[in-house]
Image: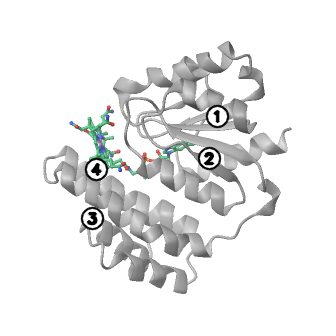
Amino acid sequence: MKESIQQVIRTIDELDIDAICSVVQHCLDEGISPEEIIESGISTGLSIVGDKFESGQYFLADLVMAGEVVREAMPVLQEKMNPDMTAARERVILATVQGDIHEIGKNIVGLILSANGFEVIDLGVDVSASKIIDTARTTGARLIGLSALLSTMVGSIRDVVEASAKAGIRNQLKIVIGGACTSDDLRLEMGADAYGETAIDALRIFKGFIAAT
Ligand code: B12
């Protein structure tokens, strides 16, 4: 792995909010793509922080700080992402499911989608199924991305699927799930349309849905 990517990982692991922008800029200057910085650097750094939380080395405040460090880096990355206009104007609703307040992964997905020409309607965290479906009806968005990290809250995914069926728009929508506690098995169980492991997968899946229509 490139030294400058390792530096991104270390900077996140060390929660060094003052250094992150210059470290990310250094990667960009070396010609590393924003997508690679996110996938190899930022995501890896965050999983190290997550592991340290799980082993008791880091506390909740450290996790929040890791999120802030990543948030700080986003404008630097966003500036360098090339919108691919084939996806232009297609609206995607993003939300973290009801009962869950994790937002870092969802925000990364949003960043990558908007940098690639999607119009992202980010409803935030802890979002009810009715709010998501009402938004789909009022905006005409056909694509929905749901982020879920808490295993106890995965039932909220089914709530969205059921609410869309109740509203009579289930077959007009593509509901994609992602987040640490999700999987393709969970997607099947909840009745969603696709599962993506990473933010880059989210982009690939949503583009695939557009191409298929
Ligand atoms: C940061 C963090 C927090 C922060 C969140 C800050 C924020 N603003 O988001 C804070 C401190 C607030 C927090 C709180 C809690 N947390 Co927490 N948290 C984490 C941690 C360490 C990292 C999550 C993260 O941001 N990862 C980095 C991002 C980039 O990864 P990601 O979200 O998975 O997203 C990537 C992919 O999954 C994908 N993706 C994400 N969303 C989507 C959506 C779509 C459509 C697609 C296709 C892809 C996709 O793309 C992203 C980039 O590639 C994880 C541990 C871990 N290893 O995951 C625990 C973790 C998720 N938390 C956990 C817990 C238990 C909690 C608390 C209940 C703790 C407590 N006792 O209060 C609360 C929950 C409160 C609530 N109601 O939600 C558990 C969940 C266990 C479980 N399976 O249920 C974990 C796994 C830690 C653990 N092992 O104990 N947490």
Quick one: label 4, few (<14), some, or many (20+) residues within 10 Å? Answer: many
Q: Amino acid at mark 3?
A: Asp
Please name the residue that numbered disc 4 is placed on: 50
Residue positioned 41% across, 40% down in the render: 180
Q: Position of residue 203 (x, y in %)?
A: 65, 51
Residue positioned 53% across, 49% down in the render: 198
Q: Quadrant of the C terminus?
A: top right
Circles 1 and 4 in contact, beta carbons < 8 Å = no
Q: Earlier in the sequence, mark 2 or mark 3?
A: 3
- Element under disc 3: helix
Q: Is mark 4 within 8 Å of ligand 1?
A: yes
Regarding residue 33, the answer to whether it shows in the image is no
Please name the residue that numbered disc 1 is placed on: 135
Residue positioned 17% across, 54% down in the render: 58
Q: Position of residue 119 (x, y in %)?
A: 69, 52
Circles 4 and 2 in contact, beta carbons < 8 Å = no
Mark 3 or 1: in front is 1
Tell me the number on the disc at residue 121: 2
Q: How many marks?
A: 4
* Residue 41, image quadrant: bottom left
C-alpha span from label 3 to label 1: 37 Å
Please name the residue that numbered disc 3 is placed on: 13
C-alpha span from label 3 to label 4: 9 Å
Q: Amino acid at mark 1?
A: Thr
Q: Earlier in the sequence, mark 3 or mark 1?
A: 3
Is 1 positioned to the left or the right of 139 in the image? Answer: left
Q: Specify the farthest residue to the left.
A: 56
Circles 1 and 2 in contact, beta carbons < 8 Å = yes
Q: Earlier in the sequence, mark 4 or mark 2?
A: 4
Q: Amino acid at mark 4?
A: Gly
Q: Is mark 1 within 8 Å of ligand 1?
A: no
C-alpha span from label 1 to label 4: 32 Å
